[in-house]
Image (cartoon, rainbow, N blue to C red):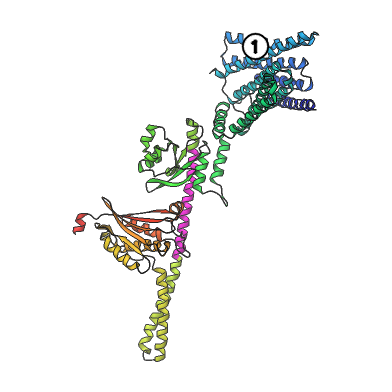
Amino acid sequence: MTNTIAGALVLWTYALAALLFGMAALATWRRGGALQRMMAGTLLLTSLWALTVAGIDAHEVGPDLAAAIRNLAWLGMMAVSVRRSGSGHGSLAALYVIVAAVMAGTALVAIAGAAVDVPEAARALGDARSVFAMMGAAGALVLLHQIVRDPRSPKTGSARVIVIALSAMWTSDLIVALGEMADAAMGPGLFLARGLAMVGVAMLLSTNRLGAGEPTLSRSVAVRAIGGIALVLYAGLTAFGAHVAGLLAPDHARIVQTAIVIGATTALLTLMSTPWLRAWFRVKVAKHLFTHRYDYRVEWQRVTATLGASGEGTAPLATRTIKALADLVDAPAGLLLRAQDGGLVPGGDWNWAEASGEGGETMTRYLRDTGRLVVVDDVMDVVAAGVPEWLTTNADAWFVLPLLHAEALVGAIVLARPPVERALDWEDFDLLRVAGRQAASFLAEDRLRTALDEARRFDEFNRRFAFLLHDIKNVASQLTLVARNAERHADNAEFRSDMVATLKDSSGRMATLLSRLGQHDGARPEPTQPVDVATLIGRVVAARRAQHPVTSDLATAPLVLAQPLRLEQVLSHLIQNAVEASATDRPVTIAIERTEDDVAIVVADRGSGMSADFVRDELFRPFVSTKPGGFGIGAYEARQLVVGMGGQLTVESRVGEGTRFRIVLPVAPALEVAA
């Protein structure tokens, strides 16, 4: 039963290989040209050999004759290729003649073995045939190695595919001959393994275009096909090793063979699950099989699909941008830096575990003016670009890619080193630059969309004010009419009663409107002047203590340049936010910190805190609020007011630990204080 199944599998695998070789021969013949037709004839002879193996018993002489003819045909193709490249010489020609003689000798020995009736002589000739077959396959592999090493040999994708296919074919022949020498019982299993390998060889040659300079098979198919051939060879070697171990230790054959199979399977699964090995395999296939490292059509489709992804559960644009560029070079992580106020600030990350910082004006200007990719290991580039220390000391940082849109720097991407690091070349630079511009256009469009959305919300906000002003106008009209009629009807008791009711109603409506308008500063801009911040803070704290515990640490501080009313408004807003975020038993603290040139006012609470993503993306955006019914312009307005006074407003917050707002204002010059 087992022999029947093995025979059927051998029949079908070699028949399938014959069909694929025949299709490849027909397709190659149709392209015309002397070399193509010679190649088509060689493929046809290989197809006939596969049919011979499928239809005739392995012990007959027919498969050996067909194999010798096939081998000589391929050897002739190699000799023609070497001669056309001009790399041939006398000693190499002699080597070709010797290998051809050995291949022909294999057929002659097989014929002699079939003609001899003496069993001992037949066995000796059978062993000699196996030796000749091994010598011919080994010699052919040596000649292939010489072609690969010769710099004058063709280096096109088509030539690489043929070399890989012939290497697999003659390697499988070598394994079969070696197995027959070791034990004839291994023949069926090795024949089946070679049949599977030849199916893979036929698939490679079927998708190859001789002389076109590039294979038609996709990179993913090439990787899978070569991986499949390697898997078959691995399985064949494992079976051969198990059989040899059984011969060497017959008393414990089953235990030894089981251990070899389990160990080989475990090792294979471990290797296949190793990211480093997969990355290394893809790099080697792209480097040695294809003229260009990238399949640009596939890569561009992947980049645009990643950037343009939408729908529920889709990652933010910053994360998609990093991943789209990281996938091009197999980078496992990345960091997005957004251009802001002449520098670069963190704008998102993908699998980036290390702490990050900001990029200074020097690096921003360098990336904008040159558009060059900066490799972190290149000391000269790093110095010229002014790469910050936090990036140069990060062992994972690989390079910095500028994102340019209409000659403006939208941001930069920092990518981590891949599992198998390699040197970047012109092809990487060109693809990354083009992909970076595409990513920059998406980021610029998103920024413009956000700005338009904010403008639309401001317009809606203005419409709300128009409605409020209309109500105020109505109240004012009512009061004007009451004042006008009071001159004539002041003595009328009924009129006085109506007037009181009208005034109460108007005052109530005005109080409501004012409460809705009170959080917005409509006063004229006041001049920047020296301000005693300790006194101002004391007044604000005193007004708040009845509402919530507020503690202060008011160290002696010099006068600062500020606008007192607006500074008081900012402090009131920040304290109010701190109070609302704090539990009733947790006080809000306000303190003064002195530096050499600045004074910092710190408002801190131990409330619920905010996430880093909310602080970075939402806190200072107008009309984004976590409060029910809030306009969401408090933090935005506070920062605008502080910046307008020549200061700076920053925030540090951790979820569950609290928040610290820090207002930094310049110290007033001595002359101005004296004045």
Magenta stretch: residue 508 in it? no
At 39% from the left edge and 88% from the top edge, which residue is drawn? 496
The residue at the far bottom in this view is: 492
Magenta stretch: residue 434 in it? yes
Position of residue 502 relative to residue 645, above or below, is below
At 37% from the left edge and 86% from the top edge, which residue is drawn? 486
Q: Give the amino acid type for the residue marked by disc 1 in the picture.
A: Val
Q: Position of residue 552 (x, y in %)?
A: 31, 61
Position of residue 215 relative to residue 173, above or below, is below
At 62% from the left edge and 17% from the top edge, which residue is drawn? 141
Position of residue 169 relative to residue 621, above or below, is above
Position of residue 248 relative to residue 427, above or below, is above
Closer to the camera, 614 or 403? 614
Please state if 343 lies on the left or on the right of 138 as rendered. left
Q: Which residue is mark 1?
A: 99
Q: Quadrant of residue 19?
A: top right
The secondary structure that dominates the magenta segment is helix
Q: Which residues are magenta?
A: 433-462
